[in-house]
Image: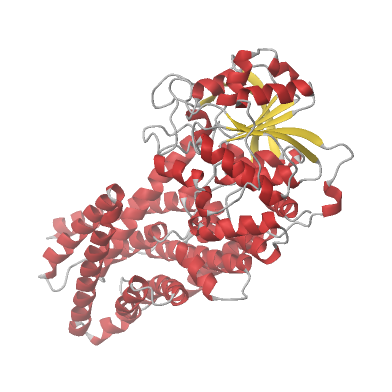
Amino acid sequence: MSTIIQSTNSYLLQARKTLIALWTLTLLIALTLVPSAFAATQADWQFNEAVRALSGVSYVPMTAVAAGVGLAIGGLMLATAALLLSRAPQPGALLAALALMTFPFTAGLFGNSDLTSYTALGNGLLGVATTIMSITGGLSLLALLFLFPDGRIYPTRLRIIALAGSLLVVAAILITSLFEEGWWVSVIALLVTVLSGVVGQALRYRAAAPAQRHQMIGVFITILAVPIYLPIGMLAISPLLTLISGYTLLVMLPIGLYLAARRGLWGEPPSPRLFAGAAGIVVLVAAVATGLWWRGNQAVAIDLAALGTPEPIPVLLDADMAMDDIGALFYLAQHPGVDLRAITVNGVAFAHCEGGVRNALGLLEVAGAPEIPVSCGREEAYPGGIPAPADWRKSADNLYGAQVRTGGREADERSAAELLADTIQAAPGEIVVVAIGPLTNLAEAFQADPTLASQIKEIIIMGGAVDAPGNVADGDPANRVAEWNFIADPVAADIVLASGAPITLVPLDATNDVPFTRSFYERLRSGALTRSAVFTYNLMYMNQWWLNGGMYWWDTLAATLVTDPELVTVEEMALDVITDEGPEMGRTVETPSGSSMQVATAADRPAFEALFLAVLNHE
């Protein structure tokens, strides 16, 4: 018997050591994720629906409060797990610690790895780690539901339900990841399993001795709150009520487990002073993070009168007329310091020529811009190019549901390459080309006249990903390193980058700093003064999903660098583009044999948003 006890104690001590190492890892991952917590909050549809229900409440303070509370709750869970691990190991306490240290990732309390801006390798590793932690958190919380407080299932007949339910939840997660329509399998599996665990805990509590009931009461109240929360969330009774009840339920879990430990459920109780100190530190860290985010997200004042320059900069815009091109076009058409001389449309990746040209002409009419020539190039990329998915292209052709009239404006008779060449040659050394789509038109013009590149003052290109992850998984699931503009025509990108023209490249490394945010949307709604601003607001209103994460002002940021290059941090690099077919086609690589250029590595989002909004409202 003593041998069995020694073996069990040895096992528990080893498990405790393993969990302490895991706790350290979770803390590091949490700190790595924290910068994305506020963006993840703004991308959460439930939070956004709750804010909409609160008319008259400013969005930025709500984001700060919600994300700050989430960080504090996640930190409290980690602190409580540490206290449980500091005691003599017992199965129930170890399981509780495992649930507390991993469930914050399941609930997304620390943020989302998809919204971080580390290197491609760093984001990939972080994504794998958070996925593992998320699954572990969900399963460990289900296990805690059945095994609390002593690591045994009661009554024993629930073993089959617990095992089958856990396996079904895992299978449902996999099904949902493969088939979007499979989400309901996850919901049903989770609901049945959770309710079975709640019933089991009710039976256990009823059969427990009075002393143990006293120890368990805090967690038991939390468990009873689960069936109340589930219908609120599933039936979408009230987004605000769902948000508040969700946070309440989450904070009840660590407090309930601490109270159980404090009342001696797992042996020697932890010190209340230690718990209070840990909770205080957690709240302080969350407050500091919230304050830093708040400070960095205050609106920046822009002097509209100072936007003009004595001599406007002559610009040619080469665009594929995707959603962020609309903002870029408005910026260049309305900025008093810009002389927009021509627009060439690229029909390779997003809008086709007919729809792209029509939309460009209509947007110029909305902006009240003078007659500006617009033409399109060919609709076929050089060999190897991958266009955007067909439904994306259809949306771009249809201007994402918006309606415009050309006001009698018509397309230029010249091809895009010819219009490019004529515009550049009419003012050699003066034109800044803003290329915010695949580089097919420029490559074709350069091949027709190799001297053209030397006559351009600067080419500002939105494209590529140097250290940031790629964004083309929807078109090429195996490719994790390319960006859409470059993979749509990698040969054209290679031709232009090697042309010898002065280039400023704006890759995903910088554009990841300027996501579509609801805070910008709210400021636009309250301050839209011109037709362009109203149009932009209406477009975002019709496409609310743009605000839920994953959408960025890619091309608009590139356009703003014509007048305000200080919006980005730049480094000089020698870059090349991989054109060989395979999982790295379209990748932007730094190599000594590459072409030297200025590369934007980061962007000032508050300053960008303020400038863009000011120009949209400039008349």
The structure residue drawn at horizontal position 31% and vertical position 71%, both measured from the top left corner, is 267
| Residue 546 location (% of width, % of height) | 51, 54
The structure residue drawn at horizontal position 62% and vertical position 14%, both measured from the top left corner, is 448
Q: Quadrant of residue 557?
A: top right
Q: As rendered, which of 10 and 453 lies closer to the eye?
A: 453
Q: Is residue 604 visible?
A: no
| Residue 270 location (% of width, % of height) | 42, 71
The structure residue drawn at horizontal position 52% and vertical position 59%, both measured from the top left corner, is 542
Against 103, residue 209 (above or below) is below
Q: As rendered, which of 353 and 240 lies closer to the eye?
A: 353
Point out the image quarter for the N terminus: bottom left
| Residue 317 location (% of width, % of height) | 67, 34
The structure residue drawn at horizontal position 67% and vertical position 62%, both measured from the top left corner, is 523
Against 380, residue 539 (above or below) is below
Considering every residue shown, the one lying at the far front of the view is 408
Q: As rendered, which of 539 and 2 lies closer to the eye?
A: 539
In the rendered structure, the answer to whether residue 492 lies left or right of residue 157 reads: right
Q: Is residue 157 visible?
A: yes
Against 342, residue 186 (above or below) is below
